[in-house]
Image (spheres, rainbow, N blue to C red):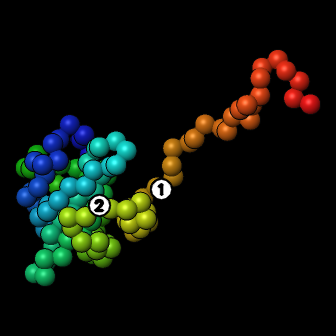
């Protein structure tokens, strides 16, 4: 998704699935703890006003101001419900990534420094 969009401007917009079926209205936006970028949206769905969390990364803001989410409505409505207004824990985010079949690999970390504490030029034996 475009990262130059103010997440506050997404709240109140309509959301549709990949087939154009209306899902509901964006209720809240959740930012990534590390980057501060918008990562998840809570969509208010149905008569019982349940919130479904959807990933913003593969989603698209359409010219008419709606959010197109590239998943089927049924999958979205079956997403884990963690309630809105609270922080998503890493475990909850992982559940959401698995639910949507998204890649959960972490960025590659540098290899450990095996020479840590070893003085250059000295004999380690």
Q: Residues within 10 Å of mark 2 (few under 14, many from 20)?
A: few
The extreme bottom residue here reads: 48
**Left or right of 106: which side holds 24?**
left
Residue 98 visible, this angle: yes
**Residue 115 picture location, percent across and down:** 75, 31
- The residue that disc 1 covers is 104
Q: Nearer the viewer, residue 81 or 103?
A: 81
Depth-wise, is mark 2 or mark 1 nearer the camera?
Answer: 2
Residue 20 visible, this angle: no
**Residue 47 picture location, percent across and down:** 10, 81
Q: Nearer the viewer, residue 105 or 100?
A: 105
**Looking at the image, which residue is at 32% across and 62% down?**
88
Q: CA distance from mark 2 to mark 1?
A: 19 Å
Q: Nearer the viewer, residue 24 or 92?
A: 92
Image quadrant containing the C terminus: top right
Q: Which mark is residue 40?
A: none
Q: Residues within 10 Å of mark 1 (few under 14, many from 20)?
A: few
């Amino acid at each position: 998704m475009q990262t130059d969009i103010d997440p506050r401007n997404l709240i109140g917009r309509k959301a549709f699935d990949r087939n154009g079926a209306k899902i509901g209205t964006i209720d809240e936006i959740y930012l990534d703890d590390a980057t501060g970028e918008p990562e998840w949206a809570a969509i208010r769905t149905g008569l019982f006003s349940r919130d479904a969390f959807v990933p913003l990364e593969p989603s698209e803001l359409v010219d008419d101001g709606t959010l197109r989410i590239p998943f089927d409505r049924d999958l979205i409505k079956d997403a884990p419900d963690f309630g809105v207004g609270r922080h998503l824990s890493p475990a909850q985010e992982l559940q959401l990534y698995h639910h949507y079949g998204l890649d959960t690999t972490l960025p590659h970390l540098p290899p450990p420094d095996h020479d840590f504490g070893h003085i250059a030029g000295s004999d380690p034996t």
